[in-house]
Amino acid sequence: MATIIKNQEANISVTLMADGAAVSVPTGATVTAQLFDIASGAAQSPVKTLASTDAGSMWGSGLVAVAFTQTDTANIVPPDTMLAVVVNGKPYRFRVMVETANAAPTKSALFVRDFVIADIRADQLIAVAQNLLPGVALSDDYIWRKVLAAESDISHQLRVELQPTQFFPKTPTDAQVEALNGMPWKEDPAYDYEPAMFTNEKWGFIAARHSPIISVQELRYAYPSDTDLNYIIPIDWIKMDKKYGQIRIVPTSNGSLALLNSYLLQLLGSSTNIPHMLNLTYVAGLANASRDYPELLDAVKKMAVLKMIEDAFVPQSGSISADGLSESMSADVSKYHDTVDRILNGEKGSNGGLMAAIHGIRMVVI
């Protein structure tokens, strides 16, 4: 995948494809190229008319080259843009990465893009596989996509956000999102109120859906709607077991307690559950994964390697024939799978690994 630096000249070459095969472009064809915003479809550059004689073009083989000026790239926005090449009215669309000169490095939840790509290229299993199939190219963009996919996969398996993530009880306003300064956010719908929450020494117990909790900004009781009766729990009343996402309300001031008692009396009278009443705004996830769980980074990199191997190479150890030369795969991919599983879940039967380190020991009561 090509990359354009905003406000800089760029030369992009793409091969027009249909049904997996290159499409030959007639010499006299009318061919244009233009950049568009992927989300909105708005044009981001002027229309450029191309010719078969343009440097880098081989229309007979479907290869089209486009030269963009600084003015052409002034309106594109990271992280990507869409290049549309139109041949005699038929469009061919390509995703092009966009970067800003002297900008902060591209990062994921765990890695700096440039650093992790170098680490993965040095991986022994990738080196062996590429020696066996030298015709398979692994671009930086392809490796980065596999890293992102591996992060997402492991995040789902561990049921945890890999970086601090803001949770809102409803869709945030544009101002709230802007105030996050790039922190990822998600919605966590309001929790149900149960009359038993303040009986039998439960102290308003709430089990947050996401843990570990890093901080709580607000716990607000809203009934019967957000615009009617509201009671915001004072922050100093909120006591947490951050690791397990458990929250309790322990009053520390009589004035506010009287207001809470008056509020709860109205609810307790109904003796019924009230859906979506407890609005919790909080930050959860791993505060510093590289410091606290360095093995997590190793697992993500290994999984990214596995995803690439499974895309392009034989997924189990065996014999490969390349250019008439039989080679034997010297590394067993299944061992990488075992290593990743061991990091995530511990040795078989151990109830350990990262899952236990993050969420505690799992058990079933029958």
Image: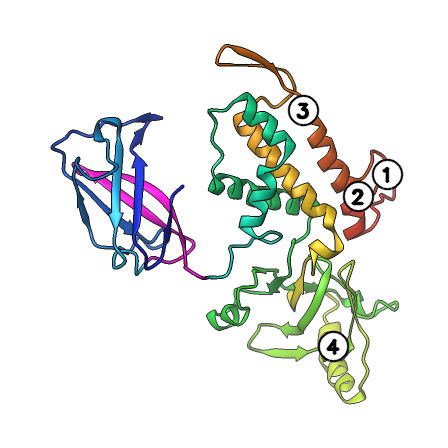
State which quadrant residue 61 falls in.
top left
**How many angstroms separate mark 3 from mark 4 (CA)?**
64 Å
- Asked which secondary structure carries label 3, the reply is loop
Foreground: disc 2 or disc 4: 2
As drawn, the label of residue 331 is 3
**Which quarter of the image is occupied by the C terminus?**
top right
Q: Residues within 10 Å of mark 2 (few under 14, many from 20)?
A: some
Which residue is disc 2 drawn over?
Answer: 353
Residue at 69% across, 31% down? 336
Q: Which residue is mark 1?
A: 350
Residue 78 horizontal side relative to residue 55, left or right: right
User: Which residues lie in the magenta part?
Assistant: 76-102
Residue located beneath label 4 in the image = 264
| First in residue order: circle 2 vs circle 4 | 4
The residue lying toward the viewer, choosing from 215 and 20, is 20
Task: Find the distance from the CA under tag 2 to the CA under tag 4.
Answer: 42 Å
Q: Pick whichever of labels 1 and 4 is earlier in the sequence.
A: 4
Tell me which amino acid carries mark 4: Leu
The local crowd at label 3, few if under 14, some if 14 to 19, many if 20 or more residues have their Cα within 10 Å, is some
